[in-house]
Amino acid sequence: MMRILTWKTCLIGAFLTNFIIGFIMWLNLDKNCNCSNFHETYTSYIRAGNQKHRLEISSINDSDVQLSSKALILVREFEYFENDLPDTVKSIRNILPTVKILIIADKIPYPPLQLPIENDENIHIISLKQYVGRSFEYTQPFNLIDKEHIFIVPDSLRMENLSQMIAMMEAHNKNPKTIIAAPIDGENLSCLSLNVSLRHWTIKYGINTADRYCNVLEGMHVVLLTKSLLLQFGYPFSRPFTTSLYIQASQQKIKTQVAKGVSFKRGKNLFSNAHYKWKYSTLNTERKHNLYKDFGIKKVIYPASKVEWHGCSKNTARCFGTVINNMPEYLYEKRWTPPCCLENLRQTARYVFTILEKCKVRYWLEGGSLLGAVRTNDIIPWDYDVDVGIYKDDIQKCEWLKNSLQQSIVDTQGFLWEKAHEGDFIRVQFSQTNHLHVDIFPFYSRNGTMTKNTWFPSHKQDTEFPEHYLKPLYKIKFIGVVVSAPNNYRKFLEFKFGKGVIENPEYPDSKVLKFPK
């Protein structure tokens, strides 16, 4: 019994001793170690990490909000029969949850677009087609374009991060007077030069090898421009959109720069089957033709001198109507004769010269046609016909001339020969449908003076002249061939038009419209 009590007493004593020693050590540690801010230091570190994460998230959100306050997204090029708009919009929404997206269609899309986000007030589908009972304002995209910067994106684009848009914005800020572009991955963009001459109804593309800026970009790409620029265009939303954009921008001397190091992913591969590929190609060709018609473009010249015509032919009417007071309507539009009309007129004149020479008819260039030959060996750029004089006695040498006085005749080449309704002369038209023509005036000699039976008082050059200008006839280059002309043609022209006529061009009625110096 005594042994047990002794053991318990020793155990309790040891416990108390250890407790007292531990208490004394804790008091001593508390005096010498300032550990009271340990918890605060630890939580501050966590708080700083959390704050940094929140700032990163906030920065992303702020960038989204900031970019959405300055810019919007516009989709113009897509097809109803096959498109990738749902995933394109979803891709944009994943990166820019608040940005306004405008989808501009030619008419109300059918089948209806199945966009991924319902009741999104920042997604708008705009139909440009007007409908009865539908307010005009609903067809006007500018009513909804409330941001200065506009990203125009193609269908089947995949946006990966905000930096793509920010980089394009930064590039635009450095060059605010340019259009900024970025390619879609896999597209080799072609940088082209473009010369637009509305006076000549012509655009000419070329390979751009020297300038870092482009007039035209070919290939699938994103475009960044300003609302202010788009408002300057007469056709801001015409299709094909980039063709329309670059023609109008080039006319205003605005170029395009490709943003460095920026590109976008491609989504669905569209128009992969043969039928859809044909359908898309056909629609695009038709749109381009309609665009050129709206712009008044008749001739498109591509690199390597390939020419594409969008004007008149033998099967269509000429590009202008009845000429009143010798002043074609295009002169009042600050344009000259459409190039297709000039080319068809050249073709008609060359054909007539071939027939006249084959029949050994004595002929010569008359009036403005001779004036054009002397100036440039070609038709005057704003003229609308070719005038030829012949000896009246020689009509009997040529069946086409002789028969045309009896009735209208269409020859084997499709040219129409007829007696002109306006008087005693012969007209050769490009075709029955296209009335571009060569007028053949029969002259005869009377006491050494060349005269005829029909005169045009409004044509000051339409006058008698001494026959010695035709004896002998000279040769002159005209429209790519060598033709007959009066001898001493300078004096002949000054006799008809007045001094200095060769060096000082004028429009037919200079009192109504002055020639642009």
Image (tube, rainbow, N blue to C red):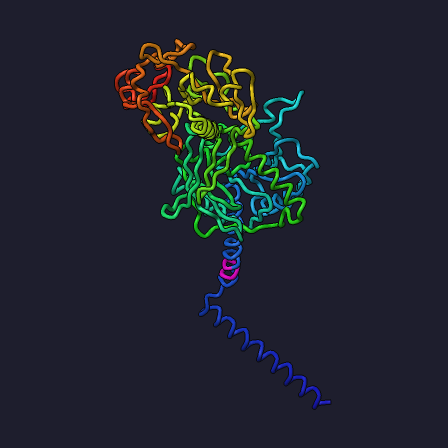
- Toward the viewer: 346 or 157? 346
Q: Can see residue 345? A: no
Q: Where does residue 125 sit, x and y in percent of width and height?
A: 62, 34
Q: Residue at x 56, y 48 (%)?
A: 159
Is 42 part of what is drawn in magenta? yes
Q: Relative to residue 348, is residue 159 drawn left or right?
A: right
Q: Where does residue 29 sit, x and y in percent of width and height?
A: 48, 71
Q: Which residues are magenta?
A: 41-45
Q: Quadrant of the N terminus?
A: bottom right
Res 206 quadrant in image: top left
Q: Can see residue 105? A: yes
Is 214 part of what is drawn in magenta? no
Q: Give the main secondary structure, helix, strand or loop, of the magenta stretch.
A: helix
Q: Relative to residue 219, is residue 457 drawn left or right?
A: left
Q: Quadrant of the C terminus?
A: top left
| Residue 88, placed above or below residue 294 | below
| Residue 17, placed above or below residue 140 | below
- Toward the viewer: 355 or 132? 355
| Residue 262, placed above or below residue 367 | below
Q: How many marks?
A: 0
Res 279 quadrant in image: top right
| Residue 97, placed above or below residue 148 | below
Q: Residue at x 54, y 42 (%)?
A: 153
- Toward the viewer: 355 or 209? 355
- Toward the viewer: 158 or 131? 131
Q: Relative to residue 200, is residue 410 drawn left or right?
A: right
Q: Residue furthest right?
A: 1
Q: Where does residue 493 sit, x and y in percent of width and height?
A: 30, 19
Q: Where does residue 372 sit, x and y in percent of width and height?
A: 35, 25
